[in-house]
Image (spheres, coloured by chain):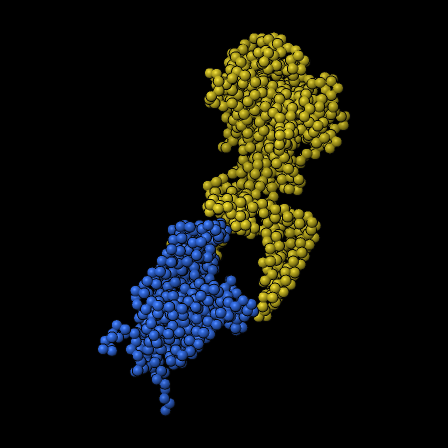
Amino acid sequence: MFNRRVAESRLQEKRTIPTVRGRILDRHNRVLAVDEPSYNLALHYDLLTNNWVDRNVRTVARKRAGASWAIMDLNQREVAMAAAREELHKAVEEMWTTMAVTLGSDRVALNERRVKVLEQVQQLAMSVWMRWQQQMSAQLDEPLALSDVATRVHEQRIAHVIMDDLDDDVRLQLQQLITAGRQDDLPNPWAQVSVVPGKKRVYPFETQTFVLDRSTLPIAMRHDTPAEITVHGVGVHAVGWMRQILREELQNPSGRWAGYSVNERVGGWGIERAEEARLRGEEGYEVLDRETRQTRRKEAVLGKDVVLSVDIALQGRIHALMDNRSVNEGGLGLMRYQQWRSREKYLEEDTPLNGSVVVLDVAQGQVLAAVSMPTITMAQLRGEEKVDLSDPINLPYINRPVSMPLIPGSVVKPLVLASALTERVVGVDEHIYCSGQYDAPHGPRCWINNYFNGEHGPLDGAESVARSCNVYFATVAARMGARQLVTWYDRMNVGRVTNSGLEEEARGYLPDLTQAGRPNASGFRVSDAVQMSFGQGPIGWTPLQAANAYAALARGGYMVTPTFFKYADGSHEQVMSDLRFSDAAVRTAMKGLQDSVYQTYGGGHHFNGIDRTRETIITFPGVKVFAKSGTAEAPKLRIDGQIVRGGDNAWFVGMVQRPGSSRPDYVIVVVVEFGGSGAAVAGPIFNQVLYALHAENYL
Amino acid sequence: MIRMPSQVITLLKPNIAWFVVAVALALSFVGVTVIGTVSEPLSADQSRWIVIALLGMVMCVLPHPKQLGVIALPAMIITLALLLLLLIPGIPTWLVRPRNGARSWINLIFMDFQPAEMAKIVFVLALAQYLRRRDSYRTLKGLLVPFAIMFIPVGLILKQPDLGSALLFPPVLFCMLLVAGAKLRHLMALLSIGVLVVAVNVAIIALDPPIISPNGRILPHPPARQWYHILKPHQEARIAALISQLKDDRRFDQTTGYQSNMAKTLIGAGGVTGMGDRSATILRFNWLPERHNDMIFALIVNRWGLIGGVGTMFLYFLLFYSFLVMAARSKDPFAKLSIVGFASLFFTQATINVAVNIGLMPITGITLPFISYGGSSLLATFMMVGIVINFASRPPEMLARPSFEFDNREAIFQ
């Protein structure tokens, strides 16, 4: 009785019982994302396009003519229909005016919304038609015009929301108008309007205001009075956003969106996307048998909350530091290009810079903050503010801390040292002589030779880290060979996603160990190893990967999966592995990092300020800092053959240890793309992050 | 003492005409009831039309067959004129108003009149009148005139376009020629050509089906392949959808094949005994286009099941059988041929309709006689019954020419 079941199934009227999407909370249970009930105003697509008038002209003309319609000829009918058309156009105009008044908006604004919806639907229809065109042209073996396949797609047959989150009194007024419209015997445009219940996703901490002390900034930006900075889009990259599911995506019954319905909103980015299954919950349903009037009900299952490891206040505070608006526009100026901090001049003075900061808790591997600049705001995502999402220079939608691998530069040196000492290719007390150039006359030069035509002389491991000597590391790497060095990088998770919980994570770059066909027995050239020993060549890591590797060093060699979640359970399990660094290796690398900050010769100790005065980088008192700067020569960014960005990526990566702790508590990674000197550009931001940690009671 | 006409005396005695009327009324009752399942007002309408149709039937019982024979040709000319009127460009639209693109109806203010329905009656009568007086159709060349009599109205009806009505004429012509004594080999040859044309067209569609867009839009074939596609794209699409559905390919279930698929679902849902009163609810939420017209058989089976469907077909069989008995008893060649014509018309119409409903033929737009909703079709159907009763109620005329005993012709004159 298959057919009877099919026929009977149509007697069932199914109504879904909506669920409530789970909340996203920060580590202190502050609500970062929550569903709130709302009412939206929706208009049928035909009303938006004015097709509604054409569709109803005949009905109105016929009703107006009454019995005489039967004996009217075509010309008389045309006249009657023209009058009806005018009447309907007038009714639609009146509807828009009344609607604008009721909404407290104006016709122009409403029209903009209308045009926007139309554009979206037409764009969608166009993509569907183009696919049909392609399929059918292939089927027919003949080129087809788009008009041959262009028929109304589903979205052109339904109502679309043009205004969301209606106030209660506006909603009631609109509902009265709609009810009156539906009771009209003649076609009434209000009958095509509906107030539909919806949910809006609210991100309460997306906008935050901070008062920041400017007295500890570099002299060029220092000020006696604090600055009040309001930042938008705090945590948006990590928390993510919602998007409308596409009908196309639902067509694969076994795909990710199985069980979803048209127009449902789903996680589009960040945690909202990665944790969709947990957050979404399960819609319930009520089935009414239209024959027996009996109902069957399955209750909805509420979505589960997701608790992040991120501290949204810390995130906001660092976001404010990273705000790349100019000082005049209300920013601090740390993220503006200034020529005195750079050795190359590709950018105009005061150009906004892009970059990121990651703060990782060493003990648990939890991400406390991951700031990406430029950011993107909810207003921009909602279309209320303009933003060019495809801007190829700034890539605003990219979550830089996890998605943008960069050449690491010198910040890898302590890790290379620990590896080399563990492999015993160099002794703890062994000195290697830096004459300014490795393997002269063609080998790479040390920075001291580049800038001052000088040399470091004999250096041990710790000092070579502190002084950031390229020759020392080139020599050590040549002894290790490329294969061994790549193996160590691989153990530190470079070139592999860290599984921190975000789908947007990038792998980074590292030569494939299985790669064949390269000269020499180890598969790689020694020159590859030499380049990679100071963070150049075929290697790239994300700020999170950098933080993760430094955290391993801080733990004495234990790698723990970094995570964006506060609680490790089921899908977010953290895995631990031991890099097996020798104690001496860790001790020496850590000493090098500490000397880098506290010895006057250290690369992380100071930079020369705007007037060439020496400015100490780390001014935050009472804690122990282990850090390394890096000024990494970055590949130039070209668009249409033109160089639009060039110069060095500024890195400052390190650890901070609270008084009383036996080992570092937090790893901080700062990177500024094409910013210039690691010490002068990223270093001050690192220092300000320490103040931010203090302000949020971490230090 | 009033002398009653012999026709009335014959009619008052128990006879087969009573039976025919009873079957026709039974079928009409099935129609009214099943239309009532989906719409009470339409059912009431149909009941009123039955009364009018019965009056029309009585009107057709009265005139003498000879008079019918005499008026057959003028009636044919008038009908052709009306069919032509439908096609004249510039005719006021209040008089001829296209429906779904077809110019098939004339507005008579109180009702819409469909000349194609009248054409069915007068075609049978005119053909019978032609065949009774000649035997030229025993040659292949002689078949030209009967075919011309068919093709003129068929051509005009196809122009409306009303493929469904036009399809009924060739089988009627075939049956009447067969009974009149046309040579079987000639008819078989013509039939073979017809079958071949249909088969070739179906094969073309099966091998090079029309492309139907996901929204049901039918795309034209590329110019290089258009020359061998004789049927219109929408006709090809229906056949292609039917072939697909017969192969259990569900692609067209929501577009071109929707109507056919829904009819089959409703028929299947009826099962053996039908869904009874539940049928009304089921039909409300399983929308079948033209459900009270062309697709009414699906409703019958849904309501009364296989038993109801077979019962209805049995009633048609009884009607057809009664017509054949009356034809066999009739000594008048005009009457005999007319009865066979009407019988074959009903048979063809019912067979095609049922075949369409159960998904063996593509949708053609043919109604189920006596049952489908529609005034002018019901009136025409009962008028045919009236004419048949008229013929059956006449006492045999003594001097009638022995009909169509061609095989003994030489023997008679020897």
From this view, report whether residue A552 is shown above or below residue A566. Answer: above
> Image quadrant for the C terminus of chain B?
bottom left
Residue plotted at (56% across, 35% down): A271
Residue A139 showing in the rendered view: yes
Give the residue at the far front of this rendering. B141
Quick one: B375 or A25, which is closer to the camera? B375
What is the quadrant of residue A210 in the picture? top right
Residue at image location 72% in from the left, 27% down from the top = A349
> Which chain is represented by yellow in the image?
A
Along the viewing direction, whichever of B354 and A598 lies nearer the viewer: B354
Q: Looking at the rendering, which quadrant does residue A373 occupy? A: top right
The answer to which of B108 and A53 lies nearer the viewer is B108
At 74% from the left edge and 17% from the top edge, which residue is drawn? A613
Q: Residue B272, image x and y in percent?
A: 35, 59
Q: Using the rendered image of the protein, determine whether residue A102 is visible from the camera's viewpoint.
A: no
Along the horizontal axis of the image, is A189 left or right of A507? right
Residue B307 in the figure: left or right of residue A463: left
With respect to residue B342, does A187 lie above or below? Answer: above
Report the residue at 38% width, 55% height from top.
Answer: B200
Q: Residue furthest right?
A: A224
Q: Position of residue B205 (x, y in %)?
A: 41, 53
Count of numbered tags: 0
> Where residue A300 appears, x then y in whole percent?
52, 45
Q: Color used for chain B?
A: blue
